[in-house]
Image: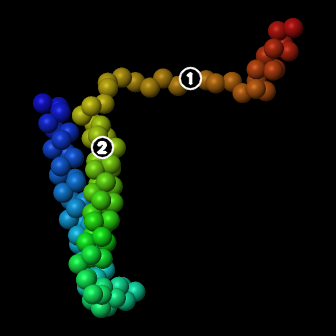
Amino acid sequence: MRRHRLLHLLAVNGLAGTVAGIVAAAGLLLLNVGGLGTLVAGAEEPILPVALMTFGFVVTLASVAMGSAIMRIGQDGEDRPEGHLIPIRIETDEELARRRRRMR
């Protein structure tokens, strides 16, 4: 059952990243950022640059969404082990040297 939950998590976040990539690419073209929309519209075959740009955005943003979802696993508090933290004193080099001199 755990395996299917992970696949579901990846699929949902991959889909969200895909939608974000398509929206980002379309936004750049429609808003004509840096003259990109005009440049693509004037191309002989505008489908190729649009497809390449959209594919790049989709791959990048879907990967980011899926990666961040994986890194967030266990942060919701459901998989945290029970227990208490115990502070441990760590001596510095100076403290160790002082203690060794006293022992002589």
Location of the C terminus (image quadrant) = top right
Q: Is residue 37 visible?
A: no
- Residue at left 18%, top 57%? 15
Callout 2 amino acid: Ile
Identify the residue position indicated by label 1 in the image: 88
Picture coordinates of residue 79, whole percent (x, y): 27, 31
N-term-proximal mark, 2 vs 1:
2
User: Element type at marker 2?
Assistant: helix
- The image shows residue 5, relative to residue 82, as above or below, that is below
Callout 1 amino acid: Ile
In the displayed structure, does residue 9 sit left or right of residue 24? left
Q: Nearer the viewer, residue 77 or 19?
A: 19
- The image shows residue 81, relative to residue 31, as above or below, that is above
Q: Nearer the viewer, residue 92 or 102?
A: 92
User: Element type at marker 1?
Assistant: loop
- Residue at left 25%, top 72%? 51
Q: Nearer the viewer, mark 2 or mark 1?
A: 2
Q: Is residue 52 visible?
A: yes
Identify the residue position indicated by label 2 in the image: 70
Q: Nearer the viewer, residue 77 or 67?
A: 67
Picture coordinates of residue 31, whole percent (x, y): 29, 86
Picture coordinates of residue 23, whole percent (x, y): 23, 72
Q: CA distance from mark 2 to mark 1?
A: 31 Å
When asked about the image quadrant of residue 94, the answer is: top right
